[in-house]
Image: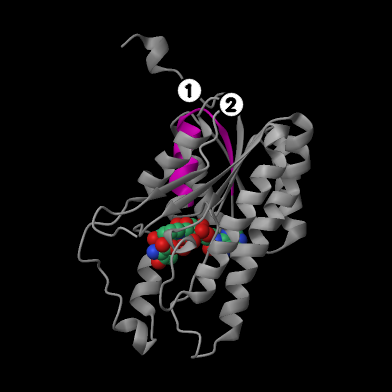
């Protein structure tokens, strides 16, 4: 291969923000966007983990910025975007990846867990979109990638509030897409099935709900997805030609279809 083709970076000159970038899927997305040439602002609460990934990306010759940010805090999200834009430039790509879940049936009331999932998975996504959407529309260019789930399309015992939050992400994204498509802005939902991440391992190994324990085993009886597979899906969507909208990508383990 000629060196010019080998060195081609499809996201060169682009600025991306990835939330929930300190581990799991968000870390993989940050690495792949940076490898594709984007300058990536990585947001999460655990700054030490973000800094480690930032160093790793820098050593590979990429550009990354670690920003401590809790997506449930609207003021912090606005600061995240302001800091990114003053340091790296206007945001071209927002990846709303931060998300949490608790595996517990609703009848075993833990209302504070419901609030936490709504705060991160719904309000956190809205906070981030709110901080970038008008700028994208003014610039007539932008891409919002929302991390949904296969559970944004089907029920799952023990995941009621989580599935509700991902159904919200799906519905909101469809309408937002219609509102901003003529402003040059694209909205993509990624719908992963089970992905091997710290979040998945922790929630499945610590769940104490008896009904759920009968249903879910860990490790899985078949190979699940690596975070890099989901990062590739994001990369595919954000590198499509400008007039092409990759609106949804459902990626599941072969043995775990809908
Ligand atoms: N793993 C899976 O099987 C699947 C995951 N998904 C979705 O993918 C996304 C990532 O999941 P996954 O990588 O597995 O999860 P992990 O639990 O492994 O990672 C979650 C990430 O979100 C961050 N985060 C959590 N709360 C906040 C907050 N309040 N503010 C900012 N960042 C936050 C965490 O960082 P920190 O703690 O440092 O803040 C961490 O970086 C989620 O939206 C999830 O719903 C969808 C389908 C399947
Ligand atoms: C969080 C999960 O456990 C999950 N499999 C999903 O979102 O699809």
* Quarter of the figure with residue 257: bottom left
* Horizontal side of residue 11 vs 8, given as left or right: right
**In the rendered image of this protein, does residue 144 appear above or below residue 58?**
below
Q: Residues within 10 Å of mark 1 (few under 14, many from 20)?
A: some
* Horizontal side of residue 182 vs 200, given as left or right: right
Residue at image position (24%, 66%) is 220
Q: Residues within 10 Å of mark 2 (few under 14, many from 20)?
A: few
> Which residue lies under the disc numbered 2?
243
**In the rendered image of this protein, does residue 141 appear above or below residue 157?**
above
- Identify the mark nearer the N-term, 1 or 2: 1
Residue at image position (35%, 67%) is 201
Give the SS element for disc 2: loop
Respond yes or no on whether mark 2 lies under 8 Å from ligand 1.
no
* Horizontal side of residue 154 vs 125, given as left or right: left
Q: Residue furthest left?
A: 221
Residue 167, percent from left and from top: 55, 63
Residue 7, percent from left and from top: 42, 17
Residue 137, percent from left and from top: 75, 36
Q: Nearer the viewer, residue 208 or 51?
A: 208
Q: Which quarter of the rendered image does ligand 2 occupy?
A: bottom left
**In the rendered image of this protein, does residue 139 appear above or below residue 196?**
above
Residue at image position (34%, 8%) is 2
Q: Inspect the magenta stretch and tell me whether residue 36 lies in it.
A: yes
| Residue 71 seen in this snapshot | no
Residue at image position (43%, 31%) is 60
Nearest to the eye among marks 1 and 2: give it. 2
> Which residue lies under the disc numbered 1?
9
Tag 1 and tag 2, C-beta contact below 8 Å? no
**Magenta residues, start to end:** 26-42
């Amino acid at each position: 291969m000629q060196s010019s083709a080998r060195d081609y970076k499809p996201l060169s000159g682009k600025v991306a923000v990835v939330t929930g970038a300190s581990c799991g899927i968000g870390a993989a997305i940050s690495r792949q966007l940076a490898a594709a040439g984007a300058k990536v602002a990585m947001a999460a609460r655990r700054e030490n983990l973000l800094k480690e990934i930032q160093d790793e990306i820098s050593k590979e010759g990429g550009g990354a910025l670690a920003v401590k940010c809790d997506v449930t805090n609207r003021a912090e999200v606005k600061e995240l975007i302001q800091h990114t834009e003053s340091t790296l430039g206007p945001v071209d790509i927002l990846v709303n990846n931060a998300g949490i879940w608790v595996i517990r049936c609703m009848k075993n009331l833990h209302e504070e867990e419901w609030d936490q999932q709504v705060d991160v998975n719904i309000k956190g996504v809205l906070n981030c979109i709110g901080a970038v959407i008008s700028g994208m529309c003014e610039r007539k260019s932008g891409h919002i990638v929302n991390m949904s789930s296969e559970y944004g399309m089907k029920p799952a015992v023990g995941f009621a509030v989580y599935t509700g939050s991902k159904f919200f992400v799906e519905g909101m994204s469809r309408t937002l897409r219609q509102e901003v498509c003529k402003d040059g802005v694209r909205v993509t939902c990624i719908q992963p099935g089970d992905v091997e991440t710290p979040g998945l391992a922790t929630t499945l190994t610590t769940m104490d709900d008896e009904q759920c324990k009968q249903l879910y085993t860990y490790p899985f009886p078949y190979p699940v997805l690596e975070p890099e597979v989901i990062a590739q899906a994001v990369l595919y969507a954000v590198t499509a030609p400008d007039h092409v909208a990759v609106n949804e990508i459902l990626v599941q383990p072969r043995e775990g279809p809908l």
